[in-house]
Image (tube, rainbow, N blue to C red):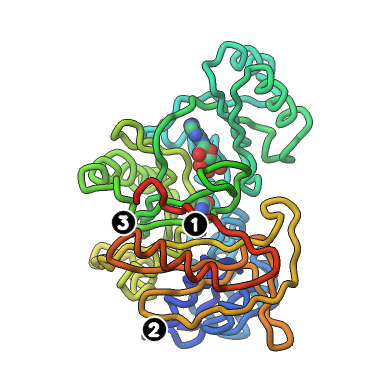
Amino acid sequence: MKILLLGSGGREHALAWKMAQSTYCEQLFIAPGNAGTAQYGQNLDIAVSDFEKIKSFCVENAISLVVPGSEEPLVKGIYDYFQQDAALQHIPVMGPSALGAQLEGSKAFAKQFMQRHNIPTAAYREFSEENYEEGVAYLRSHTLPIVLKADGLAAGKGVVILNDREEAVVEFSQMIKDAKFGDASKTVVVEQFLTGIELSVFVLTDGHSYKILPTAKDYKRIGEGDTGLNTGGMGAVSPVPFADQAFMALVEDRVIRPTVSGLEKENIVYNGFIFFGLINVNGEPFVIEYNCRMGDPETEVVIPRLQNDLLELFKAVQEGQLSSQTIYEDARVATTVMLVAKGYPEAYEKGKVISNIPAPTQDQLVFQAGTKAAGGEILTNGGRVLTVTSLATDLGIALTHSRQTAEIIDFEGKYYRRDIGYEFV
Ligand code: AMP
Ligand code: GLY
């Protein structure tokens, strides 16, 4: 297969690393990629949502599979774009249709879908300009804390949790009246606050059957002890210790199966990953969010633990034969610790020289995110710079190993959390 992978994060480095190991991988291109992905294929100067350039490249280079890493091209409809173009129809896109991607692209769509299929999630109401005053009254009588969610994609910033009703009214007004998140906050979901511990569950589906991948937990806050601003993710562990067989049986019965069969019943085309952002409330799983792609940095612990040939799984998805596959997981645990640029997740510097990146071993891999190669050096080129994944028989050992390497890798302004996985050791 000649593959085009879309994206430039640690997730895409991990996917490129994995796909390059497959016997099916003839050639790999990454648009736009980073200094890490360039080790496994050719980076292209094409943005993930520049569908016209993607089309020309695919046609001219006889691409046989497109793998979108992030939600952006999926929510913008890359699947449908390929389906509707005679020159592209024969090229499978590993991901949902635009309608399927609405599970991530619209919180209101996702909530309505969960209601229709009886999937456990927080109670909610949906508001927009039309029922704005009703929304204000609703907030003034709501229990605290109040969860406000912009309906559309808001670069991970669209969820606000407030402990004061009047502050909630102000935020609500900014979202709807002042378009705080542009069109994304024209509709706002107001949700019941759930208390519990979160985890990420991933499945791969061909729209009919599904396979559950290793579980993971990510750490979203910038500061140790889960404090400070939200980030894209500062680290992750896999598997999640409390996601035992009994809990995962509930997840499968109440969440995964009804989601996949709900998509099928509603004729929503979905060939790809579903990311279930779950919360464990006293042993019961609830869905916090759906994403239509793998997580980042969860991929950097999930993919190294997946022993299958990833392209064989993708091929099975495209052929509607996923049910014939068995997932094999490495019995070792994986941890990843993200190194970020000074200032992240607010304004940060770029262009710092990175040194001491160790070569991959059987039990450690460095996945690059915001990096670029220039003049024989690797420079920082993003907020999340790179992540150190370690595999070991024991979580504590893996974490120590990730931290040791995080200490050795160097660039000006480097920061990382030393407490990833703290609840489990
Ligand atoms: P999201 O952008 O949907 O991932 O939400 C960001 C974070 O907000 C989640 O990871 C949760 O920590 C938190 N969150 C979202 N919805 C709820 C809820 N209903 N109850 C408690 N926390 C929530
Ligand atoms: N790590 C969370 C996400 O990828 O959305």
Farthest left residue in view: 246
Give the image location of residue 275, x and y in percent: 43, 51
At 40% from the left edge and 82% from the top edge, which residue is drawn? 21
Secondary element at image label 1: strand
The mark found on residue 212 in the picture is 3
- The type of residue carrying mark 1 is Gly
Asked if the beta carbon under badge 1 is closer than 8 A to the nearest atom of ligand 2, the reply is: no
Instruction: Indicate the position of residue 69 as horizontal and vertical percent values.
Output: 53, 64
Residue at 60%, 37% in the rendered image: 159
In-front residue for pair 259/31? 31
* 323 and 384: which is toward the camera: 384
User: Can residue 255 be spotted in the picture?
Assistant: yes
**Residue identified by numbered label 1:** 235
Question: Helix, strand, or loop for circle 3?
Answer: strand
Quarter of the image for residue 190 reads top right
Regarding residue 7, the answer to whether it shows in the image is no
Q: Nearer the viewer, mark 2 or mark 1?
A: 1
Question: How many residues crowd mark 3 within 10 Å: few (<14), some (14–19), many (20+)?
Answer: some
The residue pinned by badge 2 equals 24
Query: Label 1 to label 3, Cα distance in Å?
Result: 21 Å
- Dots 3 and 2: beta carbons under 8 Å? no
Asked if residue 38 is positioned above or below residue 131 in the image, the reply reads below
Q: Nearer the viewer, mark 3 or mark 2?
A: 3
> What is the secondary structure assignment of the residue under circle 2?
loop
Q: Position of residue 389 (x, y in %)?
A: 44, 68
Q: Residues within 10 Å of mark 2 (few under 14, many from 20)?
A: some
Task: Residue type at mark 3: give it.
Answer: Ile
Q: Identity of the amino acid at label 2?
A: Tyr
